[in-house]
Amino acid sequence: MEIWTLMQYYSSVDFEYGRRSMTERNIQEVFQAHSGELMALPGVIGTAVGHDKDKPCIKVFTRKSTAALEKKMPSELEGYPVVLEVIAEIKTR
């Protein structure tokens, strides 16, 4: 499923996650509001809207997880979980 499709799907559905309701702003709005600050974290190479355990989340991509990055990265933004994913380097042909 493409990221844009996920963003459209999750922005139209209300979810409960933990203590906070995610109905105040949809995931697309939260992603747009915070993507810049997430990209400014050391080692972050990308961000996206995705899902974790069938719930919407904001994904943060890095090539290497470090204690410094994990300490600075929020565990949630406006009720949506933030998930760190380590990915391999992508090379163009």
Image (cartoon, helix red, strand yellow):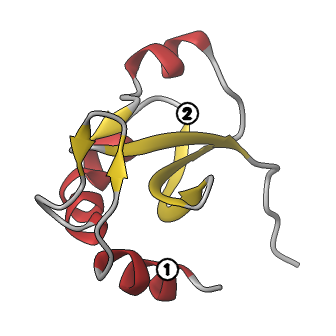
Residue at 49% in and 79% down: 6
Amino acid bearing label 2: Gly
Along the polypeptide, which appears first: circle 1 or circle 2? 1
Within 10 Å of disc 2 (Cα), the crowding (few <14, some 14-19, many 20+) is: some
Classify the position of the C terminus by image quarter. bottom right
Q: Residue at x 18, y 57 (%)?
A: 33
Q: Residue furthest right?
A: 93
Which of the two discs, 1 and 2, sits closer to the camera?
1
Q: Secondary structure at mark 1?
A: helix
Seen in the image, is 13 located left or right of residue 50?
left
Q: Position of residue 46 (x, y in %)?
A: 52, 55
Position in image of residue 64 (x %, y %): 71, 30
Q: Secondary structure at mark 2?
A: loop
Given residues 8 and 44, the one toward you in this image is: 8
Judging depth in this view, the residue of 13 and 28 nearest the camera is 13
Quadrant containing the N terminus is bottom right
Residue corresponding to mark 1: 6
Q: Residue at label 2?
A: 43
Q: Is residue 14 above or below residue 46?
A: below
